[in-house]
Image (cartoon, rainbow, N blue to C red):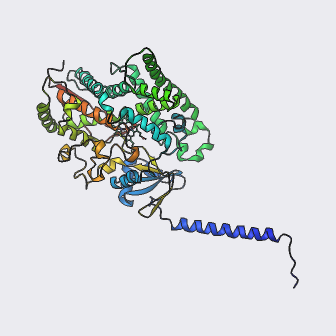
């Protein structure tokens, strides 16, 4: 047999080698893929994944239900995206606190979020890394534990205005929401720009609340369906929901309000006025070259968006729970009487010495976390947890609501029982969050390096407002029925269904 030497032999050999190499790589890749153990997931439907399982329920209940079937941590497919759901505080702590470098990023998938944060120039939605670290440091310098005392007097003064506004109803049944919103809005505005509004009915307040609702509407899962179903990109935009241009227009108007606030502070500073506020800190950082003008607006944006409804909602839940539990109010009044005289001004500092009051706030936050699913975290690297493979860029949802209702840690978890916290060493939630998970009071401020950046402001304003409310009033239900504290409205935050109460003055000092 004659063997003919082909001129193409080197090419053929190289091709065979390449194909063989590719086959080997593929087989290794497949093998490692096959060997990987993925977290369990509910049965999926094509295209929808698991979205249909949420239909008719809310996501919290749905995740709690599937957690009971699949375990404390599982996968849930939202259209094209795999979410990892965590229902257990110890798992949340292990991943987000102990493996902090992996589980504390944010996803950049949502095109609306990109527009609304000017390409992630903010802090709350910026992926983990140097930019986030820098912005968080600036934020915490202005609103951390060491700086909060600067603002305590402002906050106490706003708590006084809150009780005056509520007393103006003259014991008639009122929905406290608008007054609570004014309280938290003024706390934030004062800290941000040394400004405040006078009246709960000021149009500026309502405009602020409305634009927040719109902002969060764009960011909710149904606000931008293209994020869940990329295929929708190919349909006419008008079929799919708001388009990028609409969101850009909204953002322009939203930023103009923030720019207006910043410009006013610049003018006061130029006129030599002696003020202390976040805008001033930010303008100084800009002069030092640490941040630019876009970052300033985005940091103000985060402060306002994160700080307004979270705290006002928590106070609304506290009022509803106290109205449902007159015997707890009696105990509180007794404790308050020991610490504050009738003609005292209630303040954060004397409230700090009323353990039951602190316990009532903890219990309210434990039962009614303002952000029950936190803000989604994302992984910045592949990881293995308990033998399960968790890929880089996974979205991680911390189901704080379900974690807080763990019946082992909190016997009778659905009952409002502040006394459960009285035996605890009385420390701030912010301090407990840095310790062991077993000692943590609740998880409502989130986890790890991303834990609520406003935690110190929030704790101060909640205690200050609660002290003023309890000192000033008997909070009574407007009718014989209990206020519904089981159901909730899930919007920007998890708020109670509308309710009315009567604020009966206990104090002649309250003019
Ligand atoms: C009762 C009141 C509040 C509650 C329950 C609350 C809860 C939360 C939660 C659950 C998160 C997400 C944490 C995570 O990703 O694990 C968060 C983040 C954040 N909160 Fe709050 N919050 C409250 C008040 C405030 C206030 C008053 C401010 C501002 C002054 C604020 C500013 C922020 C910011 C900027 C972030 C993003 C942090 C980051 O991504 O690094 N929060 N908050």
Q: Residue at x 47, y 64 (%)?
A: 37
Q: Residue at x 22, y 46 (%)?
A: 415
**Image coordinates for residue 337, horizontal then vertical, percent:** 12, 31
Q: Which x, y percent locates residue 378?
A: 47, 49
Q: Quadrant of residue 324?
A: top left
Horizontal side, residue 49 vs residue 461: left or right: right
Name the foreground residue: 337 vs 69. Answer: 337
The furthest residue to the front: 288
Q: Residue furthest top?
A: 271
Looking at the image, which is closer to me, 9 or 113? 9
Can you tell me which quadrant of the image ligand 1 is in? top left
Q: Nearer the viewer, residue 257 or 297?
A: 297
Left or right of 166 in this view: 7: right
- The location of residue 375, given as percent across then percent down, is 42, 43
| Residue closest to the far bottom | 1
Confirm whether residue 235 shows in the render. yes
Left or right: where 440 falls relative to 382: left
Quarter of the image where the N terminus is located = bottom right
User: Toward the viewer: 328 or 344?
Assistant: 344
């Amino acid at each position: 047999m004659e063997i003919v030497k082909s001129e193409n032999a080197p090419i053929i050999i190289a091709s065979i080698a390449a194909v063989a190499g590719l086959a080997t790589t593929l087989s290794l890749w497949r093998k490692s893929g096959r060997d990987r153990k993925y977290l369990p997931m509910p049965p999926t439907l094509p295209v929808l994944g698991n979205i249909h399982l949420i239909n008719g329920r809310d996501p919290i209940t749905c995740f709690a239900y599937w957690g009971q079937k699949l375990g404390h941590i599982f996968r849930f497919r939202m259209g094209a995206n795999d979410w990892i759901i965590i229902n257990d505080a110890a798992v949340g702590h292990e991943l987000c606190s102990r493996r902090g470098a992996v589980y504390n990023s944010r996803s950049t998938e949502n095109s609306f979020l990109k527009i609304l944060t000017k390409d992630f120039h903010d802090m709350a939605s910026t992926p983990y890394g140097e930019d986030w670290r820098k912005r968080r440091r600036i934020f915490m310098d202005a609103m951390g534990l060491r700086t909060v005392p600067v603002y305590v007097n402002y906050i106490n003064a706003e708590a006084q205005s809150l009780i005056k506004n509520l007393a103006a109803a003259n014991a008639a049944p009122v929905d406290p929401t608008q007054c609570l919103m004014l309280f938290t809005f003024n706390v934030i505005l004062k800290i941000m720009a040394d400004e405040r509004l006078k009246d709960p009915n000021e149009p500026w307040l309502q405009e602020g609340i409305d634009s927040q609702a719109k902002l969060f509407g764009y960011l909710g899962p149904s606000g931008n369906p293209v994020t869940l179903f990329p295929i929708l990109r190919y349909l006419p935009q008008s079929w799919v929901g708001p388009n990028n241009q609409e969101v850009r227009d909204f953002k322009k108007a939203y930023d103009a309000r923030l720019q207006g606030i910043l410009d006013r502070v610049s003018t006061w500073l130029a006129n030599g006025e002696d003020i202390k506020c976040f805008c001033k800190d930010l303008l100084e950082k800009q002069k030092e070259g640490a941040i630019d003008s876009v970052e300033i607006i985005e940091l103000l944006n985060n402060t306002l968006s994160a700080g307004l409804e979270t705290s006002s909602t928590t106070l609304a839940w506290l009022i509803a729970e106290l109205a449902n539990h007159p015997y707890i109010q009696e105990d509180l009044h007794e404790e308050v009487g020991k610490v504050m005289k009738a003609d005292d001004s209630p303040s954060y500092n004397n409230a700090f010495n009323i353990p039951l009051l602190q316990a009532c706030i903890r219990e309210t936050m434990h039962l009614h976390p303002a952000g029950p699913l936190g803000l989604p975290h994302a992984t910045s690297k592949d990881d293995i947890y308990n033998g399960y493979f968790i890929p880089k860029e996974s979205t991680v949802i911390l189901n704080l609501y379900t974690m807080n209702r763990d019946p082992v840690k909190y016997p009778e978890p659905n009952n409002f029982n502040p006394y459960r916290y009285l035996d605890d060493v009385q420390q701030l939630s912010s301090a407990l969050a840095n310790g062991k998970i077993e000692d943590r009071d609740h998880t409502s401020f989130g986890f790890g390096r991303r834990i609520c950046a406003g935690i110190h402001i929030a704790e101060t304003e909640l205690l200050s407002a609660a002290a003023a409310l309890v000192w000033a009033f008997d909070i009574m239900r407007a009718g014989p029925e209990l206020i519904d504290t089981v159901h909730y409205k899930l919007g920007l935050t998890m708020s109670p269904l509308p309710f009315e109460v009567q604020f009966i003055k206990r104090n002649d000092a309250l003019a």
